[in-house]
Amino acid sequence: MMFLLSLILFLGGMALFAVAFMVTSFQGVVFAGGIIAICLAMALPMFATRKSPR
C-alpha cells in the first residue's frame, strides 16, 4: 500500500514539474508542489517503516 502511494506521489510530482513550464500563471507554486510531492514520496516509506526505540 505504501509503495503505491509513494509511486503515485512520485509520478504526480514529476508531472507537476512538467506542467509548471506550460501553465501561464502560478508556475512557482506548481513547481514547488512537485518538489513537495516528491519529498513526501521519499519520506513516507521511511517514517512508516521506522522501528520504535527501546
Image: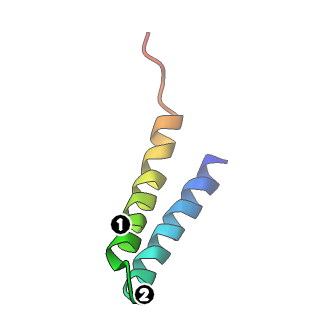
- Residue with the most extreme left position: 28
Q: Nearer the viewer, residue 35 or 25?
A: 25
Q: Secondary structure at mark 1?
A: helix
Question: In percent of the image, x 60 and y 52: which residue is there?
Answer: 3
- Residue with the most extreme top position: 54
Q: Amino acid at mark 2?
A: Val
Question: In percent of the image, x 44 and y 9: which residue is there?
Answer: 54
Depicted 49 relative to depicted 27: above or below = above
Q: What residue is disc 2 on?
A: 23
Q: Give the mark nearer the N terminus: 2 vs 1.
A: 2
- Residue with the most extreme right position: 1
Q: What residue is disc 1 on?
A: 32
Question: In percent of the image, x 42 and y 90: which residue is there?
Answer: 22
Percent of width and height locating residue 14: 45, 73
Q: How many marks?
A: 2
- Residue with the most extreme front position: 25
Q: Amino acid at mark 1?
A: Ala
Percent of width and height locating residue 32: 35, 66
Depicted 32 relative to depicted 15: above or below = above
Q: Quadrant of residue 39?
A: bottom left
Percent of width and height locating residue 2: 61, 47
